[in-house]
Every structure is written in structure tokens, then in C-alpha cells.
Amino acid sequence: MQHENRWLNIRQTARYIGMAIAFVRKAVRRESIPFTRIGTKALRFDREALDAWLSANGNWGVATGPESGVFVLDADSDPGGRKRSGKGGHVKK
């Protein structure tokens, strides 16, 4: 049986919560995610505290699709059928 570490580094944390490392760094700067700083640079994240944080801050159970009125768009289109240019999110007709 593999032992799971209680404490995660920033890369492991990003993978654990399914977000980018940049998101985790920003959340640390805003102090919106539970973390512990070791010395001046090393960050560690408690797996149990992350689970509680996700439960409290997650948007679980959001239905998507025609019945719910909530739609998820892919990055290359918008509701008007226009294509994105790929530069800064500008939309072409």
C-alpha cells in the first residue's frame, strides 16, 4: 500500500485540486487557500485542509445543458457562432 503524504508542495497541490500552479500561487498571495510557509520560500499544503477548503469553496453539482439554462462554451467559439482570433481573446465576425 502506498503511503499518501499529508503535506503537498505547490506542484502536487495544483495537481490535487485540478488547477494550474499559477492559480495556486495567486491564491497564496491573496491568502485564500490554506497553506504553511516553511522559512521564507517553501510552501506546503495540508491535504485535509485543502479538502475542507474545496468543500467550502467549490461549485459542486452545477448542472449544464439545455435543461438547466447553463452552457459551457469551448475556447474557440461564442454563442454568436463567431471564431476567436487567438490574439488576446478578440472576436472576429
Image (cartoon, grey):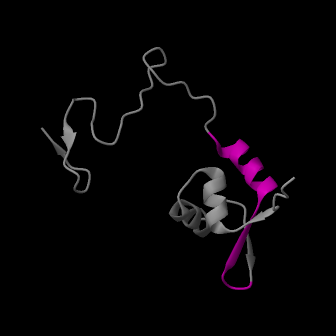
Asked if residue 31 shows in the view, the reply is no
The stretch drawn in magenta includes residue 84:
no
Q: Which residues are magenta?
A: 39-58
Task: Tell me which corner region of the image, top left, top right, bottom left or bottom right, holds residue 91.
Answer: top left
Residue 25: x and y, percent? 57, 67
Position above or below: 21 against 16: below
Position above or below: 41 against 32: below
Residue 57: x and y, percent? 66, 45
The stretch drawn in magenta includes residue 56:
yes
Tell which residue pokes out farthest to the bottom in this image.
Answer: 40
Tell which residue pokes out farthest to the top in this image.
Answer: 67
Q: What residue do we see at 69% from left, 85% from top?
A: 40
Q: Nearer the viewer, residue 32 or 65?
A: 65
84 horizontally vs 73: left or right: left
- Number of marks in picture: 0
Tell which residue pokes out farthest to the left in this image.
Answer: 93
15 horizontally vs 37: left or right: left
Asked if residue 3 shows in the view, the reply is yes
Q: What residue do we see at 82% from left, 61% from top?
A: 6
Q: What residue do we see at 73% from left, 70% from top?
A: 44
Q: Which quarter of the rendering shows the C terminus?
A: top left
Position above or below: 48 against 71: below
80 horizontally vs 56: left or right: left
Residue 92: x and y, percent? 14, 43
Residue 13: x and y, percent? 66, 60
